[in-house]
Image: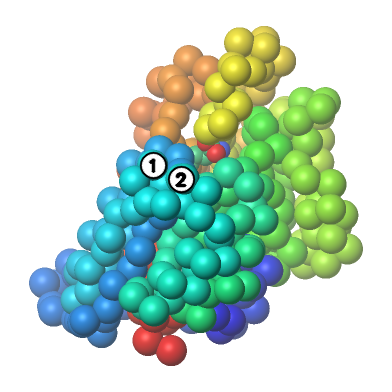
């Protein structure tokens, strides 16, 4: 595996398999109460420029369970927030830490950090990508459906970081991805074009959510307004209204389709309460798996 996990393109199909197998093993060991401390003495720095519940807790608890420790580094309280350059920060943190997880706005910040850091750098979400989320979502799909091979995944809503990481995953692994996004809110053009050429089972972009969810095994929603876009919230609410994942839309998917959402969710906006809290929803198991999959990523990257 490469030094960093910044994009799902950093992973070969065998790396995905290695991560999923490790995550399954770690999840089982945790359930059985077995101690496993491969990261004893190691420290992960966690730089957050945006809010987080799941990512922060799952990384912090995850490294603790593996015998290591984590430092929460809010950009407000470090010199990064006062303009210290990324290159210096990356070089210096590499002398103290064994790995860094970064959640920030500009994707180029994480790329630049990784260029100057000698330790592994993990992308904990940028405006462009959220690779850890989609990695654990694929693990959840394997648990629920037995495999991701040949599975039809429908993503409905904003062509944001989650959509872009789904597209990158589809370029690497054999599942079918259909997205439905309103005009002007499509996924990243370069990411889509690359995946259209490389995808194993196909990536299709629709305007109509009904077309995207037809025959889907997984119906996936995310917020209409991502972090950093709050000023557009009202405008987006009108534009995205036809993209709500509700009972009617879900009825167009396969009968045994599961509903996924990276969370946090806004009930009554991108998804109805009835659907996200209903029997087809797997969102709580999905959130739990962030822990197991990121533990696998840390164990692999930090013990190399
Ligand atoms: N899904 C996700 O990344 O959640 P947080 O923003 O709470 O970390
Ligand atoms: N697209 C959302 C995902 C949150 C986990 C955002 O960037 O805010």
Q: Secondary structure at mark 2?
A: helix
Is 174 rendered above or below residue 222? below
Quarter occupied by the C terminus: bottom left
The residue sitting at 61% across, 10% down in the picture is 234
Q: In the rendered image, which quarter is residue 115 located in?
A: bottom right
Question: Residue lying furthest bottom in this view?
Answer: 304
Is 175 rendered above or below residue 254? below
The residue sitting at 82% across, 26% down in the picture is 183
The spot of residue 184 in percent (x, y) is 81, 27
The residue sitting at 60% across, 18% down in the picture is 231
Q: Are marks 1 and 2 in contact (CB under 8 Å)?
A: yes
Q: Secondary structure at mark 1?
A: loop
Is 280 rendered above or below residue 113? above
Q: Is mark 2 within 8 Å of ligand 1?
A: no
The crowding category of the residue bearing disc 1, from other C-alpha atoms within 10 Å (few below 14, some 14 to 19, many at least 20), is few
Tell whether 68 sits left or right of 291: left
Quarter occupied by the N terminus: bottom right
* Colour theme: rainbow
**Residue 54 visible from this viewpoint:** no
Q: Which mark is residue 76?
A: 1
The residue sitting at 67% across, 12% down in the picture is 235
Tell whether 123 sits left or right of 46: right
The crowding category of the residue bearing disc 2, from other C-alpha atoms within 10 Å (few below 14, some 14 to 19, many at least 20), is few
The spot of residue 86 in percent (x, y) is 55, 60
Mark with earlier residue (1, 2) = 1
Is 300 rendered above or below residue 172? below
**Residue 243 visible from this viewpoint:** yes
The spot of residue 192 in percent (x, y) is 81, 51
- Tell me the CA gap for discs 1 and 2: 5 Å
Q: Which mark is residue 81?
A: 2
Q: How many marks?
A: 2
The spot of residue 166 in percent (x, y) is 64, 52
């Amino acid at each position: 595996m490469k030094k960093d996990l910044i994009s799902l393109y950093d992973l070969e199909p065998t790396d995905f398999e290695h991560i999923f197998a490790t995550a399954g093993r770690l999840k089982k060991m945790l359930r059985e109460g077995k101690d496993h401390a491969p990261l004893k003495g190691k420290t992960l720095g966690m730089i957050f420029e945006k809010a987080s519940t799941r990512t922060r807790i799952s990384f912090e608890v995850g490294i603790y369970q593996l015998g290591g420790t984590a430092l929460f580094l809010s950009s407000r309280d470090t010199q990064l927030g006062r303009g210290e350059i990324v290159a210096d920060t990356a070089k210096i943190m590499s002398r103290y830490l064994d790995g860094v997880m970064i959640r920030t706005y500009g994707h180029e910040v994480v790329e630049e950090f990784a260029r100057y850091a000698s330790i592994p750098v993990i992308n904990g979400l940028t405006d462009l990508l959220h690779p850890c989320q989609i990695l654990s979502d694929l693990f959840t799909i394997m648990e629920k459906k037995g495999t991701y091979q040949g599975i039809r995944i429908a993503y409905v809503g904003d062509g944001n970081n989650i959509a872009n990481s789904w597209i990158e995953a589809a370029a690497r692994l054999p599942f079918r991805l259909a997205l439905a996004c309103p005009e002007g809110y499509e996924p990243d053009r370069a990411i889509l074009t690359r995946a259209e050429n490389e995808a194993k089972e196909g990536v299709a972009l629709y305007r109509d959510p009904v077309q995207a969810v037809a025959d889907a095994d997984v119906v996936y929603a995310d917020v209409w307004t991502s972090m950093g876009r709050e000023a557009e919230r009202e405008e987006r609410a009108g534009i995205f209204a036809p993209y709500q994942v509700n009972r009617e839309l879900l009825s167009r998917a396969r009968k045994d389709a599961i509903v996924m959402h990276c969370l946090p969710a806004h009930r009554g906006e991108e998804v109805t309460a009835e659907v996200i809290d209903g029997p087809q929803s797997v969102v709580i198991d999905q959130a739990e798996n962030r822990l197991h999959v990121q533990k696998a990523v840390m164990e692999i990257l930090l013990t190399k």
